[in-house]
C-alpha cells in the first residue's frame, strides 16, 4: 500500500472499532447484532434469549430449547451489513453457527493535490486513473452453550452434582470467530487478511425475574493467534471487550415481578475495553414492551465513545427504537439506530427470525395428588406426590427439592414446612431445564406443643393462637393446657393480641409494682377498659382468674354487646353480675366448648379454655382470616 492513496470514506468502517492510535482490526459483529438488539440500545448481555445471543453473549444460546434461525440486513453510509445465524439444541449442549459481514464497492481512491501548502491539513482529490476500490469484512462463528445443571446431571458428571448443585440456573458459552477481510483496487496489493478470536460468556438467574450476564469478547491473546494477519505481513489485534448486563422482567405471565398479561423488560449493559486506556465505561439501556402477542415495541440508548479532531475522547449517546411483529414461529424486527457524527443519515436495519417458541395450550404435564391447596396442618413436613404424564418431563422440583421420577414416572418426597405460611411450587422441566408446568400449593403450618395431644379438644385453637404469637409456651417447651391462668397472664395475652404494650410509668394498683413483669400490659389494658381492679385498690395479678372474670375480660377486649336477661345457663341467673357478658358472649359463639354443660362462673379458668374463648372472639377470628387464612398473601 502506498501512503499517497487513500480510500474516500474508508475510515467510516472504524465506527465498528475505534483505532485510538493503535493498529486494531474492526469486528463486524459490533453493528450486525440483529435489528431487535439495535432497537433497544444493544442491551442484551443479561437477556440473550434468542439466536442473536451469538453476537453479544454466547451463554444465552444455552437457554434455547428449539432450533432458531435469523438474518439481518441494513445499510450505513453505503456500507452493506448482513448476518445469518442459527442455533440447534442437543442433549449435550446447544450449537450455533453464524456469519456476519459488511462490504462496500465503487469507492474512488484519492491523492494529495500537488502543491498543497498545509501538510497538517492537506487537500485531496479523486484519482480517476486508478480502479475503484472495494472493501469487505466478514466473520464466521461457531458457538457452544451449555446449562451447567443439565451438564452435571449427565452420568459422567455425577460426582460433581453434589458440590456444584448450585449451578442449575448457570449457563456458560463460547464463540470461535474466523475473520476474513479484504481491500483491493486503487493500486493496493496484498490487501487481504484472515484472523481468529474467541468470545466467552456467563449467565445466571439471580431471581426468577432477574438475570445477570457477563461476556468477554476477543480474549484470545495476540501471541496465540488472536489477531488479523494481512498478506503483506501487517498484523492488527482485536481489542478485548468486557460487558456486564442485567435483564429484569417487570411484567409477564411467568417469572416477573408482577404477573400480568403484557410483557415488559428493562435491560442495562455496562461495557468497556480494558486495553484502550482512553475508552470510557459506556452504558446500553433498553426497554422491550409486548402489549400483545403480535407486536413488540422497543426503545433504547446506546452509548459509545467518539474522538474529535483534537484527539479528545467523549461519551456520546445514540437514540434507538424498534418494533417486532410476531406470528407463530416467525418474527420480523425493524431497528432504527442513530450514530454519533453522522448527521442526516438514516440508519435502518431489518431482521427475520424463525423458530420462536409458540405459546402452548396449557396441558397437564404432571398430576399432583398431594398436598392439597389451602391446607392447614400441624405437621413439620408435607408429602409432595404425583405422576408425570408426558415423556418431555425429565425433572420435577418442589421448591428447592428435587423429586426423582420412579419407574412409572411417579414422584414422592417429604418437603419441610416453616411455621405459618408456606407456598410450594411443583414444577415440571424438560431436558433443557425449561419449565413445562407449574402448580402452586399453599399450606399453613400451626405451632404445636409436646403436651398438647393431637386429639385434645382445643389442639387446633391453641395452634392458631400460638402461631399468631398471641400466647406462648413455657421455657420447657410445654403449654400446660389444663393449667390455670392468672389475671396478669390473661391481660398479657389480650394485649399481645392487639400488639399493645406500654411503659409502666406509674403504679395503678397497690400490688402491681413498676418492676412487675406484667405492669407494661396492665396499664394499657386498664386505659382501654379491658381489665379492672378491685374496690380495695388491688389487681391481684397472681390470682387465678375465674371463668366469669376471664370471659368478661375477653368480651370487653372484643367489644361484645352485653345483653340483659336470662342466660342459657341455669347457674348464671339474670341477676348475676356476669349475666349480660355471658348472654352476649353466647350469642357471639364464644362458649361453644361448653355444649350443654353448666357455665360454672366461679370455676377457675384453664389455659385451653382461655384460648378457646379468645379464638372464638370476633376480633381474633377476623385477625386469622386476614393473616393465616388469607391465602392470597401466600
Image: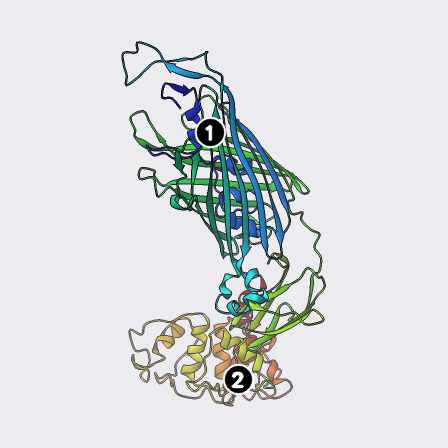
Image height of 543 relative to 114, above or below: below
Q: Is residue 410 left or right of residue 497?
A: right
Residue 403 image position (x, y, % from top left):
61, 69
| Residue 205: mark | none
Q: Quadrant of the N terminus?
A: top left
Q: Residues within 10 Å of mark 1 (few under 14, many from 20)?
A: many
- For the point 58% across and 42% down, which residue is it? 290
Image height of 428 relative to 235, above or below: below
Residue 541 image position (x, y, % from top left):
38, 84
482 or 532, which lies in front? 482
Q: Quadrant of the C terminus?
A: bottom right
360 or 235, which lies in front? 235
Q: Is residue 219 left or right of residue 313?
A: right
The mark that comes first in sequence, 1 or 2, is 1
Find disc 2 in the rendering and name its residue. 608
Residue 128 visible, this angle: yes
Q: Residue furthest top?
A: 115
Find disc 1 in the rendering and name its residue. 338
Residue 216 image position (x, y, % from top left):
43, 47
Q: Marks 1 and 2, Cα distance to the nearest angstrom?
A: 75 Å
Q: Quadrant of residue 425 in the image?
A: bottom right
Residue 600 image position (x, y, % from top left):
55, 89
Q: Tell me the SS state at disc 1.
A: loop
281 or 143, which lies in front? 143
Q: Residues within 10 Å of mark 2 (few under 14, many from 20)?
A: many
Image height of 280 relative to 559, above or below: above
Image height of 603 relative to 396, above or below: below
- Say how many tags the image has: 2
Amino acid at each position: 500500500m502506498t501512503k499517497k492513496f487513500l480510500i474516500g470514506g474508508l475510515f467510516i468502517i472504524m465506527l465498528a472499532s475505534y483505532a485510538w492510535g493503535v493498529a486494531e482490526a474492526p469486528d463486524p459483529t459490533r453493528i450486525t447484532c440483529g435489528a431487535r438488539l439495535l432497537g433497544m440500545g444493544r442491551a442484551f448481555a443479561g437477556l440473550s434469549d434468542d439466536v442473536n445471543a451469538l453476537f453479544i453473549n454466547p451463554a444465552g444460546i444455552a437457554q434455547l430449547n428449539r432450533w432458531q434461525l435469523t438474518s439481518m440486513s441494513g445499510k450505513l453510509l453505503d456500507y452493506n451489513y448482513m448476518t445469518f445465524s442459527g442455533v440447534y439444541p442437543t442433549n449435550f449442549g446447544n450449537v450455533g453457527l453464524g456469519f456476519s459481514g459488511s462490504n462496500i464497492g465503487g469507492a474512488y481512491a484519492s491523492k494529495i493535490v500537488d502543491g498543497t501548502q498545509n501538510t497538517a491539513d492537506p487537500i485531496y482529490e479523486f484519482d480517476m486513473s486508478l480502479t475503484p476500490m472495494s472493501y469487505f469484512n466478514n466473520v464466521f462463528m461457531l458457538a457452544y452453550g451449555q446449562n451447567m445443571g443439565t451438564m452435571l446431571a449427565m452420568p459422567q458428571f455425577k460426582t460433581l452434582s453434589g458440590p456444584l448443585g448450585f449451578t442449575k440456573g448457570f449457563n456458560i458459552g463460547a464463540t470461535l470467530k474466523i475473520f476474513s477481510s479484504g481491500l483491493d483496487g486503487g493500486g493496493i496489493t496484498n490487501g487481504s487478511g484472515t484472523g481468529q478470536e474467541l468470545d466467552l460468556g456467563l449467565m445466571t438467574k439471580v431471581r426468577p425475574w432477574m438475570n445477570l450476564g457477563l461476556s468477554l469478547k476477543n480474549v484470545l491473546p495476540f501471541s496465540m493467534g488472536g489477531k488479523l494477519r494481512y498478506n503483506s505481513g501487517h498484523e492488527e489485534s482485536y481489542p478485548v471487550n468486557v460487558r456486564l448486563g442485567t435483564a429484569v422482567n417487570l411484567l409477564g405471565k411467568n417469572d416477573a415481578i408482577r404477573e400480568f398479561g403484557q410483557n415488559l423488560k428493562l435491560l442495562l449493559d455496562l461495557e468497556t475495553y480494558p486495553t484502550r486506556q482512553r475508552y470510557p465505561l459506556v452504558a446500553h439501556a433498553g426497554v422491550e414492551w409486548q402489549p400483545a402477542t403480535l407486536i413488540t415495541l422497543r426503545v433504547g440508548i446506546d452509548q459509545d465513545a467518539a474522538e474529535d479532531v483534537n484527539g479528545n475522547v467523549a461519551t456520546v449517546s445514540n437514540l434507538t427504537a424498534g418494533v417486532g411483529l410476531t406470528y407463530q414461529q416467525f418474527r420480523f424486527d425493524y431497528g432504527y439506530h442513530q450514530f454519533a457524527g453522522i448527521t442526516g443519515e438514516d440508519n435502518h436495519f431489518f431482521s427475520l427470525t424463525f423458530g420462536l417458541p409458540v405459546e402452548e395450550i396449557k396441558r397437564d404435564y404432571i398430576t399432583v395428588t398431594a398436598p392439597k391447596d389451602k391446607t392447614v396442618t400441624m405437621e413439620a413436613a408435607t408429602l409432595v406426590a404425583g405422576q408425570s404424564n408426558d415423556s418431555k418431563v425429565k425433572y420435577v422440583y418442589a421448591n428447592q427439592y428435587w423429586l426423582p421420577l420412579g419407574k412409572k414416572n411417579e414422584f414422592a418426597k417429604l418437603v419441610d414446612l416453616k411455621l405459618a405460611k408456606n407456598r410450594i411450587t411443583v414444577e415440571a422441566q424438560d431436558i433443557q431445564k425449561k419449565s413445562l408446568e407449574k402448580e402452586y400449593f399453599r399450606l399453613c403450618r400451626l405451632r404445636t406443643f409436646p403436651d398438647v395431644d393431637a386429639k385434645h379438644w382445643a389442639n387446633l385453637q391453641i395452634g392458631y393462637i400460638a402461631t399468631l404469637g398471641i400466647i406462648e409456651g413455657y421455657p420447657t417447651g410445654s403449654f400446660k393446657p389444663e393449667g390455670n391462668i392468672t389475671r396478669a397472664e390473661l391481660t398479657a395475652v389480650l394485649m399481645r393480641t392487639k400488639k399493645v404494650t406500654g411503659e409502666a410509668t406509674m403504679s395503678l394498683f397497690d400490688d402491681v409494682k413498676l418492676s412487675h413483669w406484667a405492669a407494661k400490659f396492665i396499664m394499657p389494658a386498664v386505659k382501654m377498659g379491658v381489665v379492672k381492679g378491685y374496690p380495695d385498690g388491688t389487681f391481684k395479678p397472681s390470682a387465678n382468674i375465674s371463668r366469669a372474670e376471664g370471659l368478661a375480660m375477653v368480651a370487653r377486649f372484643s367489644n361484645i354487646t352485653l345483653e340483659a336477661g336470662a342466660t342459657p345457663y341455669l347457674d348464671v341467673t339474670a341477676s348475676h353480675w356476669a349475666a349480660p357478658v355471658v348472654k352476649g358472649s353466647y350469642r357471639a359463639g364464644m362458649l361453644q366448648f361448653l355444649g350443654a354443660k353448666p357455665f360454672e362462673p366461679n370455676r377457675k379458668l384453664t389455659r385451653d379454655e382461655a384460648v378457646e374463648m379468645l379464638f372464638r372472639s370476633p376480633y381474633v377470628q377476623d385477625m386469622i382470616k386476614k393473616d393465616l387464612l388469607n391465602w392470597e398473601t401466600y
